Image (tube, rainbow, N blue to C red):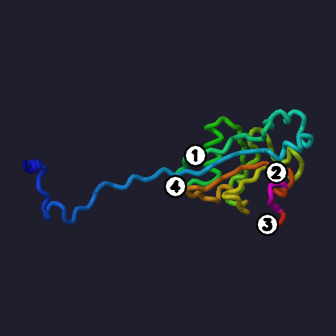
Amino acid sequence: AGTPPSTAPAATAATTAGTVSTAPAVPQPLTCTLSIDCTTLLGSLDKLPAAKRGLVPADGVLLSERTVLFEEGDTVFDLLNRETKKNRIHMAFRSVPALNSQYIEAIHNLYEKDAGDMSGWMYDVNGVFPNYGCSQYTLKAGDVVRWRYTCDLGRDLGTDVSQW
């Protein structure tokens, strides 16, 4: 009762030495996290025109936090533009050549100055409010992007744009 002979070919140094995988690396999809909210309006509905109060969801969330794909070189603006279209959320913007960026005027028909002269849309990435336009921020894998409505130049969001 011996060991049965192996049916596998014997490996030789000639067939295994110097073998290099030639399969191309599969690029991993780039993802980040996106959300849009107007929770600051929940305590300030009286600042909105009566016709717009019904636009504010009970929880203030317009787009719940979700992981989204993006392409190399995409900006925060590219992401917002694509995802609002995909989710059928109204978004209005204008080009600001002096800043070489797009300016977000409205999301979900909630416009800048709808809740007072110091109200409008701001974004933060990884908890930091950049002091430049959304077209200037190039996304990196893992970024967390939040668009938020402010009623007080960002002070109600924990920042103050008047200090920039």
Q: Earlier in the sequence, mark 1 or mark 2?
A: 1
Magenta-highlighted residues? 156-161
Give the distance between the C-alpha atoms of the residues marked 4 and 1, in whole angstroms: 13 Å
Residue 1: image x %, image y %? 7, 47
Asked whether, in this view, residue 4 is left or right of residue 33, the answer is left
Quarter of the view holding residue 46: top right
Is label 2 in contact with label 4 (beta carbons under 8 Å)? no
Residue 42's disc number:
none
Is label 1 in contact with label 2 (beta carbons under 8 Å)? no
Give the distance between the C-alpha atoms of the residues marked 3 and 2, in whole angstroms: 16 Å
Circle 3 residue: 164
Give the distance between the C-alpha atoms of the residues marked 1 and 3, in whole angstroms: 30 Å
Please tell me whether residue 12 belongs to the stretch shown in magenta.
no
Helix, strand or loop at disc 4? Answer: loop
Residue 150's disc number:
2
Q: Residue furthest front?
A: 1
Circle 4 residue: 72
Quarter of the view holding residue 19: bottom left
Binning the other alpha carbons within 10 Å of mark 2 as few (below 14), some (14 to 19) or many (20 upward) gives many
Is label 3 in contact with label 2 (beta carbons under 8 Å)? no
Q: Nearer the viewer, mark 4 or mark 1?
A: 1
Is label 1 in contact with label 3 (beta carbons under 8 Å)? no
Helix, strand or loop at disc 2? Answer: strand
